[in-house]
Image: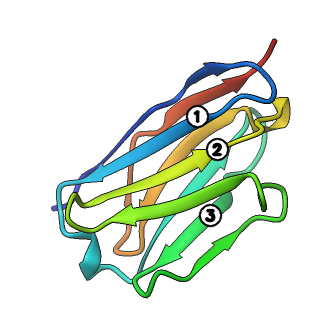
Amino acid sequence: QAQLVESGGGLVQPGGSLRLSCASSGKIVTVNFMAWYRQAPEKERELVARIMRSGITTYADSVKGRFTISRDNAKNTVYLQMNTLKPEDTAVYYCYGSNGYWGQGTQVTVSS
């Protein structure tokens, strides 16, 4: 049974950067895609970025040009590099594998 563990969240000022990591106990090459979702207070969980097994990536319009998803298959880890952060990026960020597993989430707060 695969487990996903996120890390890298925290408090950052507007315009700053963070890199989230999602470490999998299983081989991520075996799943069709890995993704990052986020959920802000009183809002529905939304897709932020997705990376296919082929390496093709997709992003929510709100993060295009600022966020980058990547994967290291040897380390079974997926990353989300977040630049030029805005207060509206504040949310709990979750890692998801297309085999149905979710991480526990990591809080990202963008505030001055």
What separation in Å lies between label 2 and label 3 (alpha carbons)?
11 Å
Image position of 8 (left or right of 65): left
Secondary structure beneath dot 2 equals strand
Q: Position of residue 2 (x, y in %)?
A: 20, 60
Q: Quadrant of residue 74?
A: bottom left
Image position of 76 (left or right of 1): right
Q: Residue furthest bottom?
A: 54
Q: Quadrant of residue 87?
A: top right
Residue hosting label 1: 18
Which amino acid type corresponds to the residue marked 1 in the rendered image? Answer: Leu
Closer to the observer: label 2 or label 3?
2
What separation in Å lies between label 3 and label 1 (alpha carbons)?
15 Å
In the rendered image, the quadrant that contains the C terminus is: top right
- Binning the other alpha carbons within 10 Å of mark 1 as few (below 14), some (14 to 19) or many (20 upward) gives some
Which amino acid type corresponds to the residue marked 3 in the rendered image? Answer: Ala
Q: Position of residue 99 (x, y in %)?
A: 34, 74
